[in-house]
Amino acid sequence: MKIALVCSSGGHLTEMLLLMESFNNHEIFFVTYDHPTTKKLGYKKFLIDNIGTNPWKMIKASFKFLNIL
């Protein structure tokens, strides 16, 4: 089964990494912000710009999300 782990860089990413044993025998990938921390991940990943509350960035990111799915 493919599992997408969607989180921000920082604390949520750390929590996801602590749960990695739960995803054994599954194909996982991350969808997270483009950040120096996330670039070092040893897993398949899709990096997006930090959206914040900018509606234009949100629209741009929604196309990336559709492409990922």
Image (tube, helix red, strand yellow):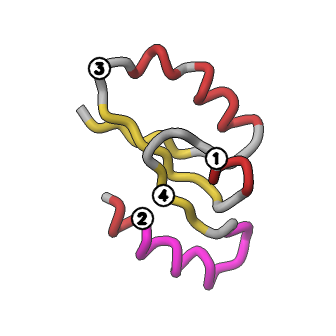
Q: Which amino acid type is marked by label 3?
A: Asn
Sequence-earlier tag: 3 or 2: 3
Name the quarter where the N terminus is drawn. top left
Q: In this picture, which residue range is highlighted in magenta? A: 51-64
Q: Secondary structure at mark 4?
A: strand
Q: Residue 60 placed where, x, y %?
A: 52, 80
Q: Residue 37 placed where, x, y %?
A: 72, 48
Numbered label attached to residue 25: 3
Q: Which residue is mark 4?
A: 46
Q: Which residue is mark 1?
A: 40
Q: Which amino acid type is marked by label 2?
A: Phe
Residue at horizontal 35%, vertical 61%? Answer: 68
Tell me: 30 left or right of 55: left
Q: Secondary structure at mark 1?
A: loop
43 vs 67, nearest the viewer: 43
Q: Measure the C-alpha gap from mark 4 to mark 3.
A: 20 Å
Tell me: 50 left or right of 69: right
